[in-house]
Amino acid sequence: MKVFQRFNYKMNNLHNLHHQHPQSSQKIDILSKFIVNHYNKLRKESNNTNDPLVVGLSGAQGCGKTTIVKQIVQYLKSAKNLSVVNFSMDDLYLTYEDQCQLANQNPGNQLLEFRGAPGTHDVLLGRQILQELRDVQQKYSERLHERLRERDNVKSNNVSILIPFYDKSLRNGRGDRAPIEEWIRVSPPFDIILFDGWSLGFKHLPSSELQEAYDRASSSLKTLKSHSFSHIKIINEHLKRYEENWYPFLDIFIHVEAENINYVYQWRLEQEHSMKQRGKSGMSDEQVKDFVNKFMPAYELYLERLSKENFFSKGDKGIYGSHLKLVMNREREIIKETLI
């Protein structure tokens, strides 16, 4: 199996990375400290001290999630000697064929025409991976205790999990899931599981609240009113499946928020230009704008609650302090840090 660069980070560049990019260093210091503190807390409180800490990380397109995740993984591995596995909602997008089928089943619903909105991910595949990561770690832990009693070595190479890879450059920038031969193979131990996505943490609205939000939206200022309410309702219903299948796995939550959500247009454009400079095919500027427009209704509906409220419900495992929010300006500099 092909092992991609994001799972094979070079640790000897960490020192230079932190000194060349002070803002990057600040982000990683804040986020890593938050994660490590909760990891240590889990180790002290958990009956099974080998349970992995599952971290959810949400951030708008173009905010630098991929880079942030890469640097967090790099730091936790090199500085803290922790075993970390990460994967993204982006790699759970439907295959190109399944996406086309979804679009055909929802004629006229532009929110489901291409990848992006709730409903365009393979939710059950995501649940399967999260469950397998937890189960494999548990089995590894059990074998570890047995081998320690027998004073034997533990080898993890007989147990592994495949993480899908979604190539956004395929199909003229429309994207497709890579062949299974290119998926990433990971093996335990897993101290930390880092799961990220642009809409991770969004929660559906009750029918009455959804209708009120739609009615309040100004057609001149919002993208929400460019879609029919019936189409918005479908997206809202799809979001329930994300909550039911993914969110129960998360132990702590990180939200990287744009000071102004409209920064996403410029950030996403910069990413597309960068991809083309690396020799990959991509979308035109106008296609990028149309593409981002399809994400905006979800931001308009669900971002406010995530920005103000703890991701976890009261009485849940996530009490105060389990949700960290960082706010970025247009230059992706941190201007605010809040523990919720």
Image (cartoon, grey):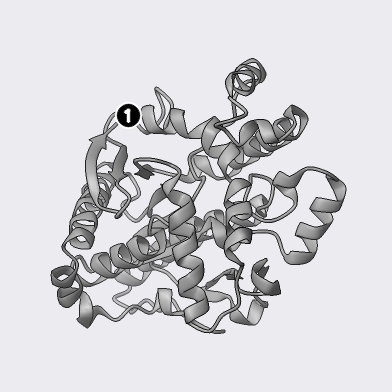
What x and y, as percent, mark residue 257?
37, 43
What's the residue at 57%, 63% (across, down)?
285
Q: Is residue 208 above or below residue 323?
A: above
Camera-side residue: 150 or 123? 123
Look at mark 1 in the image and give the residue it sits on: 319
Instruction: Locate residue 154: give its quadrant.
Output: bottom left
Q: Is residue 100 above or below residue 185?
A: above
SS label for mark 1: loop
Instruction: Locate residue 91: give its quadrant.
Output: bottom right
Query: How many numbered marks have been drawn onto this rendered protein structure?
Result: 1
What x and y, as percent, mark residue 298?
57, 38
What x and y, as percent, mark residue 237?
69, 33
What's the residue at 61%, 74% (across, down)?
169
Residue 24 visible somewhere in the drawing:
yes
- Circle 1: is it few (<14), some (14-19), or many (20+) Cα within 10 Å? some
Residue 59 visible somewhere in the drawing:
no
What x and y, as percent, mark residue 280?
56, 80
Camera-side residue: 57 or 265? 265
What's the residue at 75%, 52% (across, down)?
113
What's the residue at 22%, 43% (across, down)?
335
